Image (cartoon, rainbow, N blue to C red):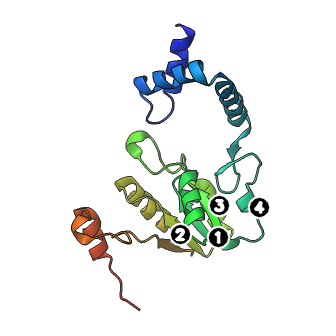
């Protein structure tokens, strides 16, 4: 296979990149960004070699324990379980949450061969057994797999006498009811709470 075809095929490993997008990227790098392409290749090789999972939370880290887990200023009684590092980053940027995290790196999906072991739930089980965590905040996505994962996590937390909580789902702030999809509106209506 020609080198340019290998480059195009290699670029297809990225999510959402099909044959045409990969071809466009390859041509762009070769025509206009050879220096940037070389830097990308070097940094990518270094990242693949040196970035691993934190031994405590499974987030990406260059060290054994990531900076969040190592921070003495975080509340170790609060643990937030999220599906991905991107979800953790979204919570960090949008909220004042100062607890710790557990990154599942996915969600339960038996049809795809993703069970508790693949999500590191043995590690989470051991962490909850330590007795320091008092609340497990379950922040999985409101999909069928995310809800199944949330249910499993809640059961795991209760086994260790840890209070499970779930992020609220429903009508977005600034949203108008007539434009909210039926499933979201039904869920929001069914899980309504008393106003203070």
Disc 2 and disc 1 in contact, CB within 8 angstroms: yes
Disc 3 and disc 2 in contact, CB within 8 angstroms: no
Figure check: 64 above or below 79: above
Q: CA distance from mark 3 to mark 4?
A: 18 Å
In this orientation, which residue lies closer to the viewer: 83 or 112? Answer: 83
Disc 3 and disc 4 in contact, CB within 8 angstroms: no
Figure check: 118 above or below 5: below
Question: Residue under circle 4?
Answer: 70
Closer to the observer: label 2 or label 1?
1
Q: Residues within 10 Å of mark 1 (few under 14, many from 20)?
A: some
Farthest top residue in view: 1
Q: CA distance from mark 4 to mark 1?
A: 12 Å
Q: CA distance from mark 2 to mark 4?
A: 20 Å
Question: Residue under circle 3?
Answer: 126
Residue 41: x percent and y percent? 67, 27
Q: Decide which of tag 2 and tag 1 comes sooner along the chain.
A: 1
Q: What residue is at 50 percent from the left and 20 percent from the top?
A: 9
Quarter location, residue 175: bottom left
Label 1 element class: strand
Farthest bottom residue in view: 196
Q: Residues within 10 Å of mark 4 (few under 14, many from 20)?
A: few
Q: Which mark is residue 99?
A: 1
Q: Which mark is residue 137?
A: 2
Residue 141: x percent and y percent? 43, 58
Q: CA distance from mark 2 to mark 1?
A: 10 Å
Disc 1 and disc 3 in contact, CB within 8 angstroms: no
Closer to the observer: label 3 or label 2?
2
- Inspect this view and state whether residue 25 appears: yes
Q: Decide which of tag 3 and tag 2 comes sooner along the chain.
A: 3
Figure check: 118 above or below 169: above
Figure check: 58 above or below 46: below
Disc 2 and disc 4 in contact, CB within 8 angstroms: no
């Amino acid at each position: 296979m020609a080198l340019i075809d290998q480059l195009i095929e290699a670029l297809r490993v990225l999510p959402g990149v099909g044959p045409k997008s990969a071809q466009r990227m390859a041509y762009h790098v070769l025509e206009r960004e050879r220096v940037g392409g070389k830097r990308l290749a070097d940094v990518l090789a270094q990242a693949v070699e040196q970035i691993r999972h934190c031994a405590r939370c499974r987030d990406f880290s260059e060290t054994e324990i990531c900076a969040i887990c190592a921070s003495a200023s975080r509340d170790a009684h609060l643990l937030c379980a999220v599906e991905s590092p991107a979800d953790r980053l979204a919570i960090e940027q949008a909220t004042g949450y100062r607890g710790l995290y557990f990154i599942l790196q996915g969600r339960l999906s038996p049809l795809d061969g993703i069970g508790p072991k693949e999500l590191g739930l043995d590690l989470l089980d051991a962490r909850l057994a330590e007795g320091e965590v008092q609340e497990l905040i379950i922040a999985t996505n409101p999909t069928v797999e995310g809800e199944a994962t949330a249910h499993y996590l809640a059961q795991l937390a209760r086994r260790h006498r840890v209070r499970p909580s779930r992020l609220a789902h429903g009508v977005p702030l600034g949203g108008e009811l007539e434009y909210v999809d039926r499933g979201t509106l039904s869920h929001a209506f069914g899980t309504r709470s008393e106003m203070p």
